[in-house]
């Protein structure tokens, strides 16, 4: 059974960089697309972007200039960085698994999510 | 960007009765080359992540009870719970994975009447 666990600071100051890590167990991150999705009361579920284990990535245009997703196959981890955060980046951040070899697939596994609050 | 809308925002249904949720996309999510609609439905209970119920608009994910069904094509889709159970109280979201950014509907809250 694939399990995803997000970790990282729960509080980030405005203008700083948010960094989260997702550790995947019960399966390899290879051959799959891995997404980050966030959820806030005001914006609902928002897809941030995905990365394939080969290194190719696609990001939401609304966040493209501030976001980066990376992977460490040796540690079976997927990471998210979001720079220059503001209060509107406050949300629950989910790590999620997408398609196998194809990006255009639904999310079949989700982490439990981690709350990130942006505040001074 | 494909915009997803859902209706109603919320509904209350008696136990054992049918619940119907609608989802509409601003552009077609039907891939004519394989005749598949790139549309999924998720269920989210409080304090939990979303759970995939339906993909390709009408295919139930493994382990999902058969009282859940999906239908529709192109831009108009429906999730039906044929006989509402207490454990079905949740928020339901549709999502298109036809083109990036993959987008979600705003959700429909289902309660017991």
Image (cartoon, coloured by chain):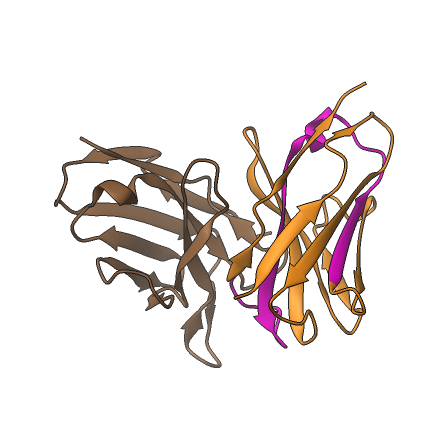
Chain colours: A orange, B brown
In the image, which residues are magenta?
A77-106
Task: Please determine whether, in this image, residue B23 is positioned above or below residue B86.
Answer: below
Residue extending farthest to the bottom is B33
- Work out whether residue A6 or residue A98 is closer to the camera in this orientation and state it: A6
The spot of residue B15 in percent (x, y) is 14, 40
Quadrant of the snapshot with the C terminus of chain A? top right
- For the question of whether residue B13 can be seen, the reply is yes
Task: Please determine whether, in this image, residue A16 is positioned above or below residue B18.
Answer: above
Q: Residue at x 26, y 60 (%)?
A: B65
Q: Quadrant of residue A59?
A: bottom right
Q: Residue at x 14, y 37 (%)?
A: B14
- Work out whether residue B66 or residue B105 is closer to the camera in this orientation and state it: B66
A80 on left or right of B62: right
Q: Residue at x 77, y 35 (%)?
A: A9
Q: Is residue A78 magenta?
A: yes
Q: Is residue B48 magenta?
A: no
A91 on left or right of A14: left
Task: Please determine whether, in this image, residue A113 is positioned above or below residue B55.
Answer: above
B79 on left or right of A95: left
The spot of residue A35 in percent (x, y) is 65, 57
The spot of residue B31 in percent (x, y) is 48, 73
Q: Residue at x 37, y 49 (%)?
A: B23
The spot of residue B37 in percent (x, y) is 42, 68
């Amino acid at each position: 059974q694939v399990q995803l666990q997000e970790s990282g600071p729960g509080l980030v100051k405005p203008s700083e960089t948010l960094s989260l890590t997702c550790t995947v167990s019960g399966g390899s991150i290879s051959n799959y697309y891995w997404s980050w999705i966030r959820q806030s009361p005001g914006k609902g579920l928002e897809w941030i972007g995905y990365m394939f284990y080969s290194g190719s990535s696609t990001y939401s245009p609304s966040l493209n200039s501030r976001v980066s997703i990376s992977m460490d196959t040796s540690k079976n981890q997927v990471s998210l960085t979001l720079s220059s955060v503001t209060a509107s980046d406050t949300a629950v951040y989910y790590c999620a698994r997408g398609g196998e070899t194809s990006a255009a697939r639904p999310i079949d596994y989700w982490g439990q999510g981690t709350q990130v609050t942006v505040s001074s | 960007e494909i915009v997803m809308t859902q209706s109603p925002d919320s509904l209350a249904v008696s136990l054992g009765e049918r619940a119907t949720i609608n989802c509409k996309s601003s552009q077609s999510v039907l891939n004519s080359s394989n005749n598949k609609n790139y549309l999924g439905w998720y269920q989210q209970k409080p304090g939990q992540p979303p759970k995939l119920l339906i993909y390709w608009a009408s295919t139930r994910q493994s382990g999902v009870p058969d009282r859940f069904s999906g239908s529709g094509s192109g831009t108009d889709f429906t999730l039906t719970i044929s006989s509402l159970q207490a454990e079905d109280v949740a928020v339901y979201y549709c999502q298109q994975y036809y083109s990036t950014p993959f987008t979600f509907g705003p959700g429909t809250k289902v309660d017991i009447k």
